[in-house]
Image (tube, rainbow, N blue to C red):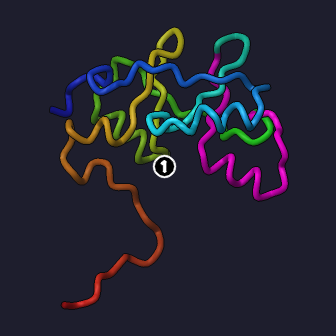
């Protein structure tokens, strides 16, 4: 199943926002539970950043009022080509430490999340490494 193209798991929803869009506009879009992130696209239609709920929370916690997303977006954007297999997309996601990847060819086509890739992969493929102490459950 790992040789399946990433487009088989991809959602085609447009999650694009401009770099000068305000935090309030981004927050309104991210309120939708089916919006895992927003991809910041400049006037040349190039993806230049990613904004997540946690980015907005951090901005507000640091005293930001309503700055444009370009002031706190995460860069660079990790992307995946539509011809890549779900296994390679999962590897990119795991290696980059991200939970969503935009699918980009000549432009934005959609996105994939770990949840969307999971049905195509063995369970261990999406595990993200943890460098801290392992979580232990108490003995019964």
Does 84 appear in magenta? no
Q: Which residue appears at 83% of the width and 49% of the height?
A: 64
- Residue under label 1, please give it: 97
The residue that appears at 63% across and 38% down in the rendered structure is: 51
Location of residue 10 by image quarter: top left
Q: Could you tell me which residue is drawn at 60 percent across and 31 percent down? A: 29
Residue 46 percent across, percent down from the top left: 64, 17
Position of 70 relative to 96 (above/below):
above
**Please, is residue 61 above or below residue 22 in the view?**
below
Sort mark 1 into few (<14), some (14-19) or many (20+) by Cα contacts within 10 Å.
Answer: few
In the displayed structure, does residue 18 sit left or right of residue 97? right
Residue 79 appears in the figure: yes
Relative placement, left or right, of 71 versus 14 is right
The quadrant of the rendering that contains the C terminus is: bottom left
**Magenta span covers which residues?**
46-69
Q: In percent of the image, x 75 and y 50: which residue is there? A: 59
Q: How many marks?
A: 1
* Spot occupied by residue 90 in the image (x, y as percentages of width and height): 34, 39
Rendered position, 57 above or below 24 = below
- Residue 78 is situated, as x and y percent measured from the top left of the image, at 53, 34
Instruction: Name the one closer to the observer, 89 or 49.
Output: 49
Image quarter hosting the N terminus: top left
Q: Which of these two is toward me, 48 or 71?
A: 71
Residue 76 visible here: no
């Amino acid at each position: 199943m790992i040789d399946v193209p990433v487009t088989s798991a991809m959602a085609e929803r447009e999650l694009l926002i401009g770099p000068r869009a305000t935090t309030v506009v981004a927050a309104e879009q991210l309120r939708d539970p089916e919006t895992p992130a927003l991809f910041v696209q400049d006037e040349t239609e190039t993806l230049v950043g990613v904004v997540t709920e946690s980015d907005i929370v951090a901005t507000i916690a640091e005293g930001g009022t309503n700055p444009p997303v370009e002031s706190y977006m995460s860069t660079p954007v990790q992307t995946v080509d539509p011809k890549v297999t779900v296994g390679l997309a999962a590897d990119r996601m795991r290696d980059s430490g991200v939970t969503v990847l935009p699918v980009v060819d000549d432009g934005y086509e959609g996105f994939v999340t770990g949840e969307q890739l999971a049905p195509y992969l063995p369970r261990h493929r999406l595990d993200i490494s943890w460098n801290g102490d392992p979580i232990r459950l108490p003995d019964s």
